[in-house]
Amino acid sequence: MNRRKFLIDASVSLTLAAFSRTLLAAGKPLAQARLTVQTNHVQNAIASDFLGFSYESAQLATPDFFSPMNVDFAGFFKQLGPNGVLRIGGNTSGSSFWSPEAASSTSTNKAEVTSVGPDEGKLPLVTSHKTPQAIRNLREFLDMTQWRCIFGLNLVSGTPEQAAEEAAAVSEILGDRLICFQFGNEVDNYAKKGLRPADYDFAAYTKEWTSFYNAVSARLPHLKVAGPDSAITGAWVSDFAKQFADKVMLLTTHYYAEGPPTSPASTIENLFSATNPRWDDEIPNIRQAMAESNLPYRLTETNSCFHGGKPGVSNSFASSLWALDLIFQVALLGGSGINFHSGGYGWYSPIVGNVENGFVARPEYYALLLFSQILGGQLIQNRLDISGVSTDESHSLVCHTLKSPAGKLQAVIINKNPAMNFNLTMQANVSSGRIAIQRLIAPTLESLSDVTFSGAPVGMSGSWRADKVEHSKLESGVASCLIPAASAALLTWEA
């Protein structure tokens, strides 16, 4: 036997006991929870392209960023699977212009390959330009990662004619890597930001949207479009679905849990609140829009705190547990996917860095990494019973169950409580075998580094390989697992 493998296996066999001793020594209370998996109650399927990132249009002004030369950066995409979705848009889509005659540029100096961070809400926006070379490089980047793209066009300061010219070129170059176009970004905020008159409303927006659609569809008869890409869903998404259901292929909105970052209320505690009106109030509108239009829905831009995120919150391990839970909420809603807004060294960006210095994974990336292990699965119902804790403490433990594409029963357990451990007893109609346990952990919720999934960190170019897998034996269909405070775990029932 390979000596390294023997040492790993030996350490794994002791892990459960070691966890128990460590937690008891820390003096954290232990609550009891019971998970009953209802395998016959099937819910939504999780698409293989469910995961994705969102980047500012201004990033395309540096053609060599999304290019096959940026191998290190591309590795983080590839680690999440070959069917992800890259969304290009953001606020800077309103100041980004198509320049077909601009000279194609290829940087020879790595320092020239600028990493553009998330827009921080400052006006006026800086003008940027996209060239055919940028789109050709983007196509090669997408081919290398095997991802596809949602592409935003400039509704703020562009014209329908300019959009048509750009869309025709982008469609020709990206080919089957292009999912669809979007007209505008957070259009429901235009009046508030001074980008449109104070009385700008949904009716005024639909006139603009229609003029863009007519111009672009005249150049592209088989045009595929998504929308409304609104910031605050409200009635915009359902009204949009009613009016344009025959013209669009996908409904899209945005969501940020907190913000602005200067607000004292933008905290880890509030990020983990059992109820978040910004999201909870939008769910009925999204459900209604999907039901009435029979269109799929995607959360195309999201993260913890708008305007680039908040240090100590958005870049902490807490953001990983929050993001993991949100991904499942979108899946339970029946959504087709989710895109986390990213870029440069933005506080909430899952991947940070630049071509010169390299790229690293922030804690939030680990949420996507864990979820990537269950893509293509089918959600199933479960019942979670918790005893001996307050209502607030019980809300901190979340359990999601599913069947993998191979038919294996799986569960993702998230404990957002920093001071409470849970002993989880699990029951399902699987009589024998064992459960494999892969943990997502960090020293504390506030940790900015030292995150591991299944015993291993994410390395250069997104490299990662499971290093430690614990096991819990099934006895008469029942097994138990310790879920430490401020941690998550992926469980897989094995024969």
Image (cartoon, rainbow, N blue to C red):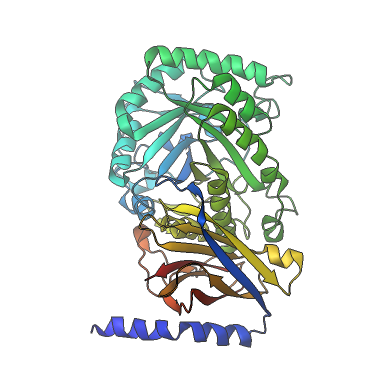
Quadrant of the image occupied by residue 218: top left
Residue plotted at (44% across, 86% down): 14
- Position in image of residue 359 (x %, y %): 41, 56
Q: Is residue 172 above or below residue 259?
A: above
In this image, 188 relative to 315: left or right? Answer: right
Question: Which residue is at the front of the view, 173 or 37?
Answer: 37
Question: Which residue is at the front of the view, 71 or 33?
Answer: 33
Residue plotted at (65% across, 48% down): 257
Q: Is residue 249 above or below residue 164?
A: below
Residue plotted at (51% across, 61% down): 363
Q: Is residue 231 visible?
A: no
Image quadrant holding the N terminus, namely: bottom left
In this image, 4 relative to 458: left or right? Answer: left
Quadrant of the image occupied by residue 436: bottom left
- Position in image of residue 192 (x %, y %): 71, 29
Q: Is residue 354 visible?
A: yes
Question: Which residue appears farthest toward the left when viewing the image?
Answer: 1
